[in-house]
Image (tube, rainbow, N blue to C red):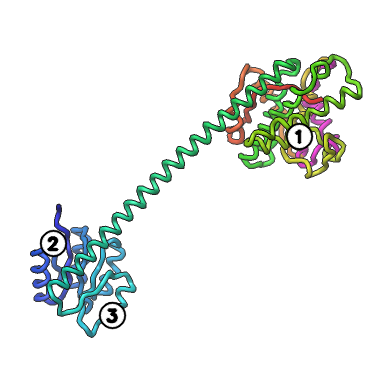
Amino acid sequence: MTAERILIVDDEPYVRAVMCAMLEICNYEPILASNGLEAIEHLEKDAPYDLILSDIMMSGLDGIGLLERVRTLQPGVPMVMVTAIHDVDVAISAMRKGAYDYLLKPFEKEQLLATVKRALEYRRLVQQNAMYQQNLEQLVEARTEMLHRAMADLERSYDITLEALGDALDLKDAETEGHSKRVTAYTIALARAMNVDSAEIRTIARGAYLHDIGKMAIPDSILLKPGKLDLHEQAMMREHCLRGYQIVRKIPFLQGAAEIVYSHQEHYDGSGYPRGLRGEQIPLGARIFAVADTLDAITSDRPYRRANSFEAARKEIKRCSGTQFDPTVVKAFLSLPDKIWIDLRAEINRQDRLSPISFGNASQNKTPQATPQTGTDS
């Protein structure tokens, strides 16, 4: 092993020589300096050192001044102050400023070696602790990254599950194919325009995508009826909000989305269903969705009518501000040009299948992405 290097700083040649001889016998490597300034030169030119033994009372740069410089140049190197008995108070003061220990003159060989041994052991412990801390930080960083990747993979698997649910509903109600893809994309665009937090946008996107999932519990005779529904059938159809909520709320990661599924047919003035919520009683995601849903309903073909223009949808949504829709959401909608909705619709129509992973990326994309399909609301 390399001999441990010890810098001896003392303006008395005899003291330097005695300390040097004592340390060399024990296989240390002493380097001598006659004052503080000379010691600084060694620290700057031929570092590192494992320990510094320094007199306190020296001309020029004294031991206290050297201690202050050492804390800057080599803060991890312990420093032992060597002093006469009448300077003990000064030595103690030096320890308060960062010195490791002090050694009283005159001293015996055993005293010197014991002090040196303790100081060097202290240095080793400090170095080991620093290495442990560094390794621990690297380990925590690596484990955190692994956790983030695992959470991302889990989130992707969740969204793939949502895609399967959407496909199942799409097989049941093919007339409105693409509705949930479009309304999810529109909802994301509106949420981004309102500066909604990215994590909340993912929740809102999932709620928008699953808004019609309760229709899987509606009898086909009602869901697929080509004509107008009677009062009993309308009441049955309206149950899809509660049915959807009951399905989705059982999935832990969809708790927030479940509230949107439950509330997506509520009106801002309290005239909606199933609970007659009004104003901010309605979750923000459901209030945003309501505008996006109407936009898609007006601009899409239905068996009983042809699609209308985005301009017509804009006028109708503006007309219903404060009654069916939240005025704040309507204001955000009106601030966006029709080209955004046209481009989103075209993008969805170009793609047969959009990745459900877009839920996680929705808030980061310049053009919000959409997700798989279900049917429309009644």
Q: Amino acid at mark 3?
A: Val
Q: Is residue 200 left or right of residue 321?
A: left
Q: Is residue 61 visible?
A: no
Label at residue 262 = 1
Provide the residue designation for mark 2. Answer: 28
The reply to whether the C-beta atoms of the residues labelled 2 and 3 are less than 8 Å apart is: no
Q: Is residue 80 left or right of residue 362?
A: left
Q: Mark 2 to mark 1: distance in Å?
A: 78 Å
Q: Residue 255: which quarter of the image? A: top right
Q: Mark 3 to mark 1: distance in Å?
A: 76 Å
Q: Is residue 305 left or right of residue 8?
A: right
Q: Earlier in the sequence, mark 3 or mark 1?
A: 3
Single out the mark in the foreground, 3 or 1.
1
Looking at this view, is 341 or 145 the one in front? 145
Coordinates of residue 245 in the picture (x, y in percent): 73, 33
Residue in the picture at 79% in, 16% down: 220
